[in-house]
Image: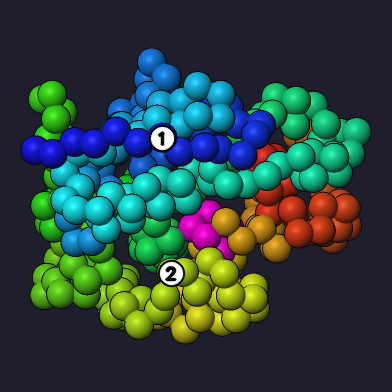
Amino acid sequence: MTSSEHQLTAAAPFDFGLSLRFVGGFSPTAGEQQVGSGRLVKALRVGGETVLAEVSAQGSAVDVRLTGARGDAAVEAALDRIRFFLSLDDELEDFYALADDAFRPVVERLYGYHQVKFSSPWENVAWAILSQRTPRAVAVQAKAALIERTGNLFEADGIVYPAFPDAEQVAALDDLAEVIGNVRKAGYLQGAARRWLDLSETELREAPYEEAKEQLLSLPGIGPWSSMFVLIRGLGRMDEMPTEKEFLRAAARVYGRALDEKELIQLSERYGPWRGYWAHYLRADG
Protein backbone atom coordinates (compact mmCIF):
# COMPACT_ATOMS: atom_id res chain seq x y z
CA MET A 1 0.00 0.00 0.00
CA THR A 2 1.30 3.44 -0.95
CA SER A 3 2.90 5.58 1.76
CA SER A 4 4.23 9.12 1.54
CA GLU A 5 6.20 11.44 3.81
CA HIS A 6 5.24 15.07 4.44
CA GLN A 7 6.13 17.93 6.74
CA LEU A 8 3.78 20.55 8.16
CA THR A 9 4.73 23.61 10.17
CA ALA A 10 2.97 24.55 13.40
CA ALA A 11 2.65 28.13 14.57
CA ALA A 12 5.11 28.60 17.44
CA PRO A 13 5.04 27.96 20.31
CA PHE A 14 4.01 24.36 19.78
CA ASP A 15 4.46 21.44 22.17
CA PHE A 16 3.41 18.18 20.52
CA GLY A 17 3.97 16.32 23.78
CA LEU A 18 1.07 18.25 25.29
CA SER A 19 -1.09 17.36 22.28
CA LEU A 20 -0.28 13.69 22.83
CA ARG A 21 -1.08 13.97 26.53
CA PHE A 22 -4.49 15.42 25.76
CA VAL A 23 -5.31 12.77 23.14
CA GLY A 24 -4.25 10.04 25.55
CA GLY A 25 -6.75 11.25 28.15
CA PHE A 26 -9.66 12.13 25.85
CA SER A 27 -12.33 9.53 26.60
CA PRO A 28 -14.57 10.03 23.51
CA THR A 29 -11.74 8.69 21.31
CA ALA A 30 -10.13 6.24 23.76
CA GLY A 31 -8.64 3.22 22.02
CA GLU A 32 -8.99 4.71 18.54
CA GLN A 33 -5.31 5.65 18.16
CA GLN A 34 -1.86 4.83 19.43
CA VAL A 35 -0.08 7.49 21.48
CA GLY A 36 3.47 7.07 22.74
CA SER A 37 7.18 7.61 22.11
CA GLY A 38 6.47 11.06 20.70
CA ARG A 39 4.13 9.73 18.02
CA LEU A 40 0.42 9.69 17.22
CA VAL A 41 -0.93 6.99 14.90
CA LYS A 42 -4.56 7.42 13.87
CA ALA A 43 -6.92 6.34 11.10
CA LEU A 44 -8.92 9.07 9.33
CA ARG A 45 -11.66 9.12 6.73
CA VAL A 46 -10.62 11.07 3.64
CA GLY A 47 -12.54 11.17 0.39
CA GLY A 48 -14.53 8.06 1.23
CA GLU A 49 -11.43 6.03 2.17
CA THR A 50 -9.69 5.13 5.42
CA VAL A 51 -6.16 6.50 5.64
CA LEU A 52 -3.53 5.93 8.33
CA ALA A 53 -1.59 8.94 9.60
CA GLU A 54 1.58 8.67 11.69
CA VAL A 55 2.48 12.04 13.21
CA SER A 56 5.56 13.17 15.12
CA ALA A 57 7.17 16.55 15.71
CA GLN A 58 10.38 18.32 16.58
CA GLY A 59 9.58 21.83 17.70
CA SER A 60 7.32 23.41 15.09
CA ALA A 61 8.23 20.88 12.38
CA VAL A 62 5.49 18.25 12.19
CA ASP A 63 6.30 15.08 10.26
CA VAL A 64 3.44 13.09 8.76
CA ARG A 65 3.53 9.66 7.14
CA LEU A 66 0.36 8.81 5.23
CA THR A 67 -0.58 5.30 4.17
CA GLY A 68 -3.52 4.55 1.92
CA ALA A 69 -4.07 8.06 0.52
CA ARG A 70 -4.44 7.53 -3.21
CA GLY A 71 -3.71 10.55 -5.37
CA ASP A 72 -2.72 14.13 -4.74
CA ALA A 73 -6.24 15.23 -3.80
CA ALA A 74 -6.49 12.56 -1.08
CA VAL A 75 -3.06 13.49 0.27
CA GLU A 76 -3.94 17.18 0.42
CA ALA A 77 -7.26 16.43 2.11
CA ALA A 78 -5.56 14.20 4.69
CA LEU A 79 -2.92 16.83 5.47
CA ASP A 80 -5.60 19.50 5.83
CA ARG A 81 -7.50 17.20 8.20
CA ILE A 82 -4.38 16.66 10.34
CA ARG A 83 -3.46 20.35 10.36
CA PHE A 84 -6.97 21.28 11.46
CA PHE A 85 -7.36 18.39 13.94
CA LEU A 86 -4.15 19.45 15.72
CA SER A 87 -4.86 23.20 15.35
CA LEU A 88 -1.39 23.75 13.94
CA ASP A 89 -2.23 27.24 12.68
CA ASP A 90 -3.38 28.60 16.06
CA GLU A 91 -1.15 31.54 17.04
CA LEU A 92 -1.34 31.67 20.81
CA GLU A 93 0.90 34.54 21.91
CA ASP A 94 -1.94 37.11 21.93
CA PHE A 95 -3.97 34.70 24.06
CA TYR A 96 -1.11 34.18 26.50
CA ALA A 97 -0.59 37.93 26.84
CA LEU A 98 -4.12 38.23 28.27
CA ALA A 99 -3.53 35.81 31.15
CA ASP A 100 -4.62 37.04 34.57
CA ASP A 101 -2.64 36.20 37.71
CA ALA A 102 -4.61 33.06 38.56
CA PHE A 103 -4.56 31.77 34.98
CA ARG A 104 -0.86 32.46 34.31
CA PRO A 105 0.33 29.21 35.97
CA VAL A 106 -2.04 27.29 33.67
CA VAL A 107 -0.43 28.97 30.66
CA GLU A 108 3.00 28.03 31.98
CA ARG A 109 1.98 24.40 32.36
CA LEU A 110 0.28 24.23 28.96
CA TYR A 111 2.60 26.58 27.07
CA GLY A 112 2.58 25.55 23.42
CA TYR A 113 -0.49 23.34 23.67
CA HIS A 114 -2.68 23.80 20.59
CA GLN A 115 -6.24 22.56 21.09
CA VAL A 116 -6.69 19.02 19.75
CA LYS A 117 -10.15 18.91 18.19
CA PHE A 118 -12.27 15.96 17.23
CA SER A 119 -10.79 14.53 14.05
CA SER A 120 -13.65 16.16 12.11
CA PRO A 121 -16.54 18.45 13.04
CA TRP A 122 -18.93 15.77 11.80
CA GLU A 123 -17.53 13.33 14.37
CA ASN A 124 -18.08 16.02 17.00
CA VAL A 125 -21.72 16.44 15.88
CA ALA A 126 -22.28 12.70 16.13
CA TRP A 127 -20.66 12.52 19.56
CA ALA A 128 -22.78 15.43 20.79
CA ILE A 129 -25.91 13.49 19.83
CA LEU A 130 -24.71 10.14 21.17
CA SER A 131 -23.63 11.62 24.52
CA GLN A 132 -26.64 13.85 25.26
CA ARG A 133 -28.18 12.90 28.62
CA THR A 134 -26.37 9.57 28.41
CA PRO A 135 -23.71 8.00 30.65
CA ARG A 136 -20.28 8.36 29.06
CA ALA A 137 -19.70 4.60 28.94
CA VAL A 138 -22.98 4.04 27.06
CA ALA A 139 -22.12 6.75 24.51
CA VAL A 140 -18.63 5.31 23.99
CA GLN A 141 -20.15 1.87 23.43
CA ALA A 142 -22.63 3.24 20.87
CA LYS A 143 -19.84 5.05 19.03
CA ALA A 144 -17.71 1.88 18.91
CA ALA A 145 -20.69 -0.10 17.58
CA LEU A 146 -21.22 2.48 14.85
CA ILE A 147 -17.57 2.26 13.78
CA GLU A 148 -17.72 -1.54 13.78
CA ARG A 149 -20.90 -1.50 11.68
CA THR A 150 -19.32 0.65 8.96
CA GLY A 151 -16.06 -1.29 8.99
CA ASN A 152 -13.68 1.66 8.68
CA LEU A 153 -10.65 -0.23 9.94
CA PHE A 154 -6.99 0.07 9.00
CA GLU A 155 -4.61 -2.66 10.13
CA ALA A 156 -0.90 -1.95 10.48
CA ASP A 157 1.77 -3.92 12.33
CA GLY A 158 -0.87 -6.11 13.92
CA ILE A 159 -2.86 -3.16 15.31
CA VAL A 160 -6.34 -2.28 14.06
CA TYR A 161 -7.12 1.44 13.88
CA PRO A 162 -10.81 2.46 13.61
CA ALA A 163 -11.94 5.62 11.81
CA PHE A 164 -15.23 7.33 12.53
CA PRO A 165 -17.72 6.91 9.64
CA ASP A 166 -18.47 9.65 7.16
CA ALA A 167 -21.84 11.36 7.22
CA GLU A 168 -22.56 9.58 3.92
CA GLN A 169 -22.10 6.21 5.59
CA VAL A 170 -24.32 7.09 8.56
CA ALA A 171 -27.00 8.54 6.31
CA ALA A 172 -27.16 5.27 4.34
CA LEU A 173 -27.54 2.87 7.30
CA ASP A 174 -30.91 1.13 7.50
CA ASP A 175 -30.27 -0.43 10.93
CA LEU A 176 -28.87 2.55 12.82
CA ALA A 177 -31.30 2.29 15.76
CA GLU A 178 -30.33 -1.35 16.28
CA VAL A 179 -26.62 -0.52 16.02
CA ILE A 180 -26.57 2.24 18.64
CA GLY A 181 -29.45 0.88 20.73
CA ASN A 182 -31.55 4.04 20.78
CA VAL A 183 -34.36 4.84 18.36
CA ARG A 184 -34.59 8.56 19.20
CA LYS A 185 -30.86 9.17 18.90
CA ALA A 186 -30.76 7.17 15.66
CA GLY A 187 -33.35 9.50 14.19
CA TYR A 188 -31.40 12.57 15.24
CA LEU A 189 -28.09 11.12 14.05
CA GLN A 190 -29.36 10.05 10.65
CA GLY A 191 -31.21 13.32 10.16
CA ALA A 192 -28.07 15.26 11.11
CA ALA A 193 -25.97 13.16 8.73
CA ARG A 194 -28.30 13.86 5.81
CA ARG A 195 -28.40 17.56 6.62
CA TRP A 196 -24.60 17.63 7.05
CA LEU A 197 -24.19 16.55 3.43
CA ASP A 198 -25.72 19.89 2.38
CA LEU A 199 -23.28 21.93 4.47
CA SER A 200 -19.74 23.03 3.69
CA GLU A 201 -17.09 22.39 6.34
CA THR A 202 -14.97 25.16 4.84
CA GLU A 203 -17.86 27.59 5.22
CA LEU A 204 -18.46 26.48 8.80
CA ARG A 205 -14.79 27.13 9.56
CA GLU A 206 -14.75 30.58 7.96
CA ALA A 207 -18.28 32.04 8.02
CA PRO A 208 -19.23 34.70 10.58
CA TYR A 209 -19.71 33.01 13.92
CA GLU A 210 -23.46 33.51 14.20
CA GLU A 211 -24.00 32.19 10.66
CA ALA A 212 -22.00 29.06 11.42
CA LYS A 213 -23.91 28.60 14.66
CA GLU A 214 -27.24 28.95 12.86
CA GLN A 215 -26.24 26.26 10.37
CA LEU A 216 -25.34 23.88 13.19
CA LEU A 217 -28.63 24.61 14.94
CA SER A 218 -30.39 23.43 11.77
CA LEU A 219 -29.12 19.89 12.43
CA PRO A 220 -31.59 17.53 14.12
CA GLY A 221 -30.56 16.85 17.72
CA ILE A 222 -28.27 19.87 17.94
CA GLY A 223 -29.37 22.59 20.37
CA PRO A 224 -27.61 25.68 21.79
CA TRP A 225 -25.17 23.80 24.03
CA SER A 226 -24.30 21.19 21.39
CA SER A 227 -23.78 23.83 18.71
CA MET A 228 -21.32 25.69 20.96
CA PHE A 229 -19.57 22.39 21.73
CA VAL A 230 -19.10 21.68 18.01
CA LEU A 231 -18.06 25.25 17.25
CA ILE A 232 -15.26 25.01 19.84
CA ARG A 233 -14.15 21.38 19.72
CA GLY A 234 -14.96 20.56 16.11
CA LEU A 235 -14.38 23.86 14.34
CA GLY A 236 -12.00 25.78 16.61
CA ARG A 237 -14.38 28.74 16.86
CA MET A 238 -13.54 30.26 20.24
CA ASP A 239 -16.07 33.09 20.54
CA GLU A 240 -18.14 31.40 23.27
CA MET A 241 -17.45 29.17 26.24
CA PRO A 242 -19.31 26.38 28.02
CA THR A 243 -20.78 26.90 31.48
CA GLU A 244 -21.64 23.35 32.52
CA LYS A 245 -20.80 22.03 35.98
CA GLU A 246 -17.56 20.34 34.93
CA PHE A 247 -16.21 23.63 33.60
CA LEU A 248 -17.33 25.48 36.72
CA ARG A 249 -15.38 22.97 38.81
CA ALA A 250 -12.28 23.46 36.64
CA ALA A 251 -12.52 27.24 36.96
CA ALA A 252 -13.01 26.97 40.73
CA ARG A 253 -9.88 24.85 41.00
CA VAL A 254 -7.77 27.47 39.18
CA TYR A 255 -9.31 30.57 40.75
CA GLY A 256 -9.43 29.13 44.25
CA ARG A 257 -13.11 29.66 44.96
CA ALA A 258 -16.53 28.52 43.85
CA LEU A 259 -17.80 30.51 40.88
CA ASP A 260 -21.32 30.92 39.58
CA GLU A 261 -22.13 31.38 35.90
CA LYS A 262 -22.30 35.17 36.17
CA GLU A 263 -18.82 35.38 37.73
CA LEU A 264 -17.47 33.01 35.11
CA ILE A 265 -18.79 35.19 32.30
CA GLN A 266 -17.24 38.25 33.93
CA LEU A 267 -13.85 36.52 34.13
CA SER A 268 -14.10 35.43 30.50
CA GLU A 269 -14.66 38.95 29.20
CA ARG A 270 -10.95 39.63 29.61
CA TYR A 271 -10.20 37.01 26.94
CA GLY A 272 -12.55 38.34 24.24
CA PRO A 273 -12.31 36.13 21.12
CA TRP A 274 -10.03 33.76 23.06
CA ARG A 275 -12.61 32.93 25.75
CA GLY A 276 -13.16 29.47 24.26
CA TYR A 277 -9.42 28.76 24.42
CA TRP A 278 -9.35 30.01 28.01
CA ALA A 279 -12.15 27.59 28.86
CA HIS A 280 -10.42 24.72 27.07
CA TYR A 281 -7.14 25.37 28.89
CA LEU A 282 -8.97 25.37 32.24
CA ARG A 283 -10.41 21.95 31.41
CA ALA A 284 -7.23 20.55 29.88
CA ASP A 285 -5.20 21.53 32.94
CA GLY A 286 -7.18 19.19 35.19
In the image, what residue type sits under mark 1? Gln
Q: Quadrant of residue 196?
A: bottom left
The region drawn magenta spans 231-235
Is 57 placed above or below 73 here? above
Q: Residue at 73% x, 46% y: name it.
A: 278
First in residue order: circle 2 vs circle 1: 1
Is 32 placed above or below 139 here? above
Q: Is residue 251 visible?
A: no
Which residue has dot 1 on it? 7
Which residue has dot 2 on it? 201
In the image, what residue type sits under mark 2? Glu
Name the element at disc 2: helix
Name the element at disc 1: strand
Percent across and percent down for residue 116 are: 51, 43
Percent across and percent down for residue 96 are: 79, 39
Q: Is residue 49 visible?
A: yes
Q: Residue at 75% x, 54% y: name it.
A: 275
Q: Is residue 233 magenta?
A: yes
Left-right relation of 11 to 142: right
